[in-house]
Image (spheres, rainbow, N blue to C red):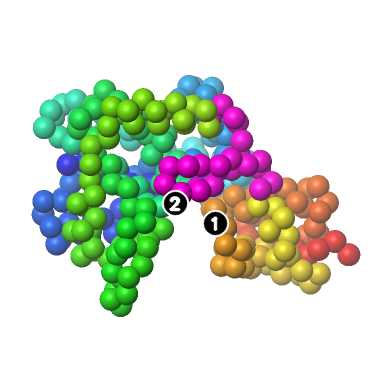
Amino acid sequence: MLHIVFQEQDVIALSKSFELDEGLKGNITEIKDDFSAGPLLNIYETQGIEARKNWWRDVLAGGDYDGSVDNGLVDDVKAVQSVKNNLAENPAETAWIWVAANKHDVCGYYWLVSQLKDFEGRVQVLWLNNLPFINEKGHIFYPENLFEIPAKEFLKAQKLARTVSSSEFEIDPDEWDKICNENKMVRTLEGYKKLLQHDADYYDADLLKFITPDWQKAGKVIHHFLSKSGKSTGDAYLLWRIEKLIQVGAIDAQGELKNMKDFEVKLKA
């Protein structure tokens, strides 16, 4: 059994569940890129892959993750090839794709599914949308992320596994191609598999609501956005957008524009 997840914390959560059910145990592959942001045009071709890497280099430049694009630790193409090799060499093996109700996972699913078409009938998907679980306090909740599910609840979650159908192998890659060709920069989830696309400045107006006339750390602005705006994305993306707002003169800044703890921002006087 091969498990495929889309967030680092998912790997930890799923691993813990193996202690409760040996039947669920298997290798876990994490798709590390977050395809809910950034360019997607020609995403399976060398030109498109390199364009995306260049965008990530720009986003991460000067911050804590500067250089991570080229450190060899993130290679999703190689990770998928490893899964395919394993399936090809072991005819009895199956792949399980875990998809929670968030844009990160859903975009990852779309990016992945067409690459596994040669193994139709051996690819399972587990959609966790709108399924209630029991949290550590015994309360019912609807998780937005796989890692929110307690280990014991994975015994329930695994019952959701179903085979990716022939029609899904046809329709979902077509939908992903349409999304990629629109060449937008931000994707949001509107329920189940429905994604909406937006321009790069999608979060800017909401970010500006948390920037005050007084100086405050960029990290504080990002924290307030993520906790109060009702929208979510990676903090690296938000930091990139703050830097863009500074560049166009929309806000003032002081300090070294490096990571979010190194400089402060405020509204234009």
Out of 225 and 141, give the one closest to the viewer: 141
Out of 196 and 212, give the one closest to the viewer: 196
Q: Residue at 23%, 63% (x, y): give it.
A: 153
Q: Which residues are magenta?
A: 180-202
x and y, in percent, of residue 4 in the image: 30, 43
x and y, in percent, of residue 145 in the image: 39, 57
| Amino acid type, label 1 | Ser
Q: Quadrant of the C terminus?
A: bottom right
Q: Residue at 16%, 51% (x, y): give it.
A: 24
| Residue 229 among those drawn in magenta | no
x and y, in percent, of residue 11 in the image: 30, 53
Near mark 1 (Cα within 10 A), the count class, few <14, some 14-19 or many ≥20, is some
Q: Residue at 26%, 23% (x, y): give it.
A: 118
Say which residue label 1 marks: 232
Left or right: 120 in relation to 148: left
Out of 44 and 183, give the one closest to the viewer: 183
Asked whether the residues under the numbered discs 2 and 1 touch, taking CB atoms below 8 Å apart as contact, a structural biologist would say yes
Out of 169 and 154, give the one closest to the viewer: 169
Say which residue label 2 marks: 102
Q: Residue at 36%, 67% (x, y): give it.
A: 141
Left or right: 105 in relation to 18: right
- The quadrant where residue 219 appears: bottom right
- The quadrant where residue 214 appears: bottom right
Q: How many marks?
A: 2
Near mark 2 (Cα within 10 A), the count class, few <14, some 14-19 or many ≥20, is many
